[in-house]
Image: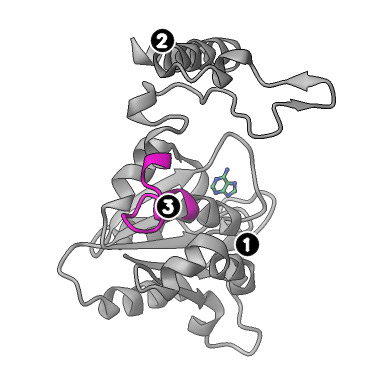
Amino acid sequence: MRIDVISIFPEYLSGLELSLIGKAAKAGLLDIRVHDLRDWTHDRHRTVDDTPYGGGAGMVMKPEPWGEALDDLAESYESDERPTLIFTSPSGEVFNQKLAEELSAKESIAFACGRYEGIDARVAKWANEKFDVREVSIGDYVLNGGEVAAMVMTEAIVRLIPGVIGNPQSLVEESYSDAEEGLLEYPIYTKPASWRGLDVPEILLSGNHGKIDRWRREQSRMITSLRRPELLEEGE
Ligand code: ADE
């Protein structure tokens, strides 16, 4: 998979070189390219923003650098599949595991990281010609920019690519996975069996895997009903 990220703070994305994502890139499973939007400006100050038409607080990202950056990006693909272009925005559809799964099957994804009050709305409209455009939020809160959101989505997507995670069974058994009926994960424990006066639930030491599975499912349902009751309704 190829992932491009366009940002005015490319250094922010250096975290993508670490851990499993960095390893996947080194192993050739992933091609991550981070671009500085200011490379597509032509003035001395490398200006990327301007005041909003209609008034209001804050600044808006100018369309011209984005247009040129996305032209070059669109030209650079070798694959025939239409690339997906994600505009990070608190006004987008909300990212979730289902979207991560859908995106993990794509050949090419690009993130356009907005800053300030956002990007001139014509950019996304124009980009529809060359990309499958989506506007995506990582949750109902406002960040200073889309870089962290692009990293969150990249991590959730990349770990679903076959070969990135050593043990594929861990993907099956985690929260939100189909095998867990979209529920939150049960509590987990490791050695020692007793720690600071707290004991691991007896049943996990019993060796009775039927009972253990049942106990874990009950725990998942209980935790989900306490913390995220709407997930139980969705699963019904
Ligand atoms: N930019 C600012 N807030 C955001 C959010 N919640 N998700 C994605 N991009 C954002």
User: In what element is the residue under mark 1?
Assistant: loop
* Cβ at disc 3 under 8 Å from ligand 1: no
Span highlighted in magenta in the image: 155-170
Real-space Cα separation, disc 3 to disc 2, in angstroms: 27 Å
Identify the image quadrant of the C terminus.
Answer: top left
Q: Amino acid at mark 1?
A: Thr
Real-space Cα separation, disc 3 to disc 1, in angstroms: 39 Å
Left or right relative to 97: residue 205: right
Is residue 203 visible to us here?
A: yes
Instruction: Give the vertical position of 180 relative to 159 (above or below).
Output: above
Q: Amino acid at mark 2?
A: Glu
User: In what element is the residue under mark 2?
Assistant: helix
Q: Mark 3: few, some, or many residues within 10 Å (few <14, many ≥20)?
A: many
Residue designated by label 1: 51
Real-space Cα separation, disc 2 to disc 1, in angstroms: 45 Å
User: In what element is the residue under mark 3?
Assistant: loop
